[in-house]
Each structure stands twice: as C-alpha cells, then as structure tokens.
Amino acid sequence: MADKDNKKKPNPTDMHVGSRIRLRRNILGMSQEKLGENLGITFQQIQKYEKGTNRVGASRLQAIANILGVPVSFFFDGVQSDEAIGRVGFAEDSAATSALEFCTSAEGLQLTRAFVRISDQRVRRRIIDLVKTLADEVSVD
C-alpha cells in the first residue's frame, strides 16, 4: 500500500522541474499550447509536467530547454537533495514555495518583466530597498 501512496504524490524533484518549466514559459509569455505544439504533444501533457505528476524524460527536457532558451541546468536550479530536504525546516520550505508561487503568478510576472526592463542598477537597487521598507512597515502594523 505504501507504493500506491508514493505513486499518487509527485516526486519533489519532478515538481521542482515542472515549476521551473512553468516559470520560464510564463516569463516568455508562451502558452502551454504553444510549448506543446513545439514539442509535438498536447497542452495537457505540459500541464502534467508542470505539476510534476508526469516525469519529463531527458531528451524531452533537452527539447524544452532549447525551446525556452535555457540550459537544462536551469530546471534544477534550487532543487534540494534528499539529504538537504531532511535538514530544511517547514518555514524555509514554505518560504521557497511562496516565492516560487509569487514568481509564477500574474502579478509576479508583471513585476519581473517590468523590473528587468530597468537598465540602471542604482534604480533597481532603490526599488528593492523600497519594497523591503514597505514590507517591514506592513509587518509592524
């Protein structure tokens, strides 16, 4: 029965890879349909990859990387080993999940797209400082 439970819950690495596929696809403004079309598969399959319910094979991951214009290693950035997962507390895991969810949200994508268009490093630094200050003020209230 334990095997059935393991099959129902996606592997954390597969979920991470899927979330990175979704992140990059959204940053580029590419639909699941368009990515699937480029790969010769359905958008439903892309959904399963992005949720981590279906594992992405090596050759398919290479094709996705080529289409999305990133190295394969991009999909593994930030992934934790089983050993590291055992050392990470719930707060850190939750914070990382929240950050990734925000980055893939409509607001997060709008903010990211606008922010990367700012070429002046000083202005970018000041925006970061402003956001930190605003967040601290909200936390105090």
Image (spheres, rainbow, N blue to C red):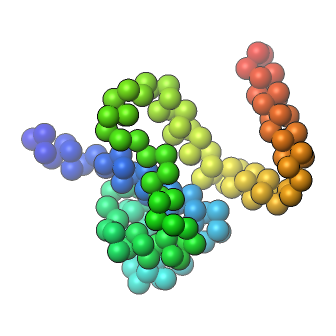
Q: From this viewpoint, is residue 44 visible?
A: no
Q: How many marks?
A: 0
Question: Which residue corresponds to the image point at 50% horizontal and 29% vertical from the top-left?
Answer: 92
Say above or below: 63 vs 129.
below
Question: Which residue corresponds to the image point at 56% horizontal and 58% vertical from the top-left?
Answer: 23
Tell me residue 4's x, y (percent): 15, 47
Q: Is residue 4 left or right of residue 20?
A: left
Q: From this viewpoint, is residue 124 visible?
A: yes
Quarter-wise, where is residue 125 in the image?
top right
Question: Which residue corresponds to the image point at 49% horizontal and 70% vertical from the top-left?
Answer: 65
Q: Is residue 68 left or right of residue 11?
A: right
User: Could you say which is closer to the camera, residue 138 or residue 88?
Assistant: 88
Say above or below: 101 vs 50.
above
Question: Which residue corresponds to the image point at 78% horizontal and 16% vertical from the top-left?
Answer: 141
Tell me residue 44's x, y (percent): 40, 70
User: Could you say which is closer to the camera, residue 129 or residue 1?
Assistant: 129
Tell me residue 19's x, y (percent): 48, 54
Tell me residue 135's x, y (percent): 76, 28
Quarter-wise, where is residue 90 in the image?
top left
Location of the N terminus (image quadrant)? top left
In the picture as drawn, the residue positioned furthest to the left comes out as 1
Say above or below: 130 vs 32.
above
